[in-house]
Image (spheres, rainbow, N blue to C red):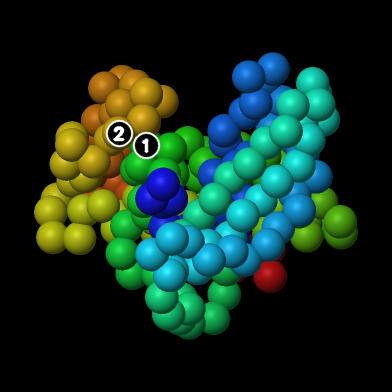
Amino acid sequence: MNPPLSRTNAEAHLYMDLHACSCGSTRFPRHSAVVALADGDLASRYTGACEGCGEEREFVFRLAPTPSSTGGGFHYGSAEPSQLLDPGEWLLVADAYAGSVPAESTGEAGQRARAALTRAVAALDEVAKFAPDGEEVPGDAFVSERGRQLHQREPGRFRRDRLAAVRDTYAELLARLG
């Protein structure tokens, strides 16, 4: 078994949120432990019974040899692209978070809006990591079915200039929320 690398706990939890049980539920109490792999590397192991059907779920993620240090603020990973999610999945995550922000965002709703926009910006940063030197994310970066479908429907959304424009818009909205 060679588990995929999870660069942060946030990335691991997002991956689990996006990969439903066979019954369709994504919710399960996540008991976690650090375990040693056969090759000596460390991994995070998450287990728990699905809240929908009771089936036992397990996810194992290889830990980075050195902790991620990308500076302050919320982030899903370090400088390298994700091994868990492809750029299409990251863009869908950004869309979902940004789409959850209400028009009126004051008080508690403002706090939720700030959290959602922070995660949307971080997800867009993850998409951009798949095109470090190019004008757009290359087609072979899309390995999930939902990522490939989004890329086929809207390939222009993966151009670096469009990604930057959307990210800047979300960051500006975030700044206005304080």
Q: Quadrant of the C terminus?
A: bottom right
**Residue with the most extreme front position:** 38
Q: Is residue 177 above or below residue 30?
A: below
| 138 to the left or right of 48 | left
Q: Nearer the viewer, residue 155 or 80?
A: 80
Amino acid type shown at disc 1: Gly
Q: Secondary structure at mark 1?
A: helix
Identify residue for label 1: 88
Q: Is residue 88 visible in this depiction of the protein?
A: yes
Q: Is residue 89 above or below residue 41?
A: above
Identify residue for label 2: 143
| 59 to the left or right of 141 | right
Residue 168 place in picture, x, y as percent: 42, 59
**Residue with the most extreme left position:** 134
Residue 163 place in picture, x, y as percent: 33, 49
Residue 174 place in picture, x, y as percent: 60, 62
Seen at 87% across and 59% down, the residue is 107
Q: Residues within 10 Å of mark 1 (few under 14, many from 20)?
A: many
Figure quadrant of residue 129? bottom left
Seen at 20% across and 60% down, the residue is 132
| 149 to the left or right of 37 | left
Q: Residues within 10 Å of mark 2 (few under 14, many from 20)?
A: some
Along the polypeptide, which appears first: circle 2 or circle 1? Answer: 1
Q: Is residue 36 above or below residue 17?
A: below
Residue 110 place in picture, x, y as percent: 77, 57
**Residue with the most extreme right position:** 107
Q: Secondary structure at mark 2?
A: loop
Return the mark for residue 79: none
Figure quadrant of residue 126? bottom left
Seen at 30% across and 33% down, the residue is 143
How far is disc 2 from disc 1 in space, using C-alphas? 9 Å
Tag count: 2
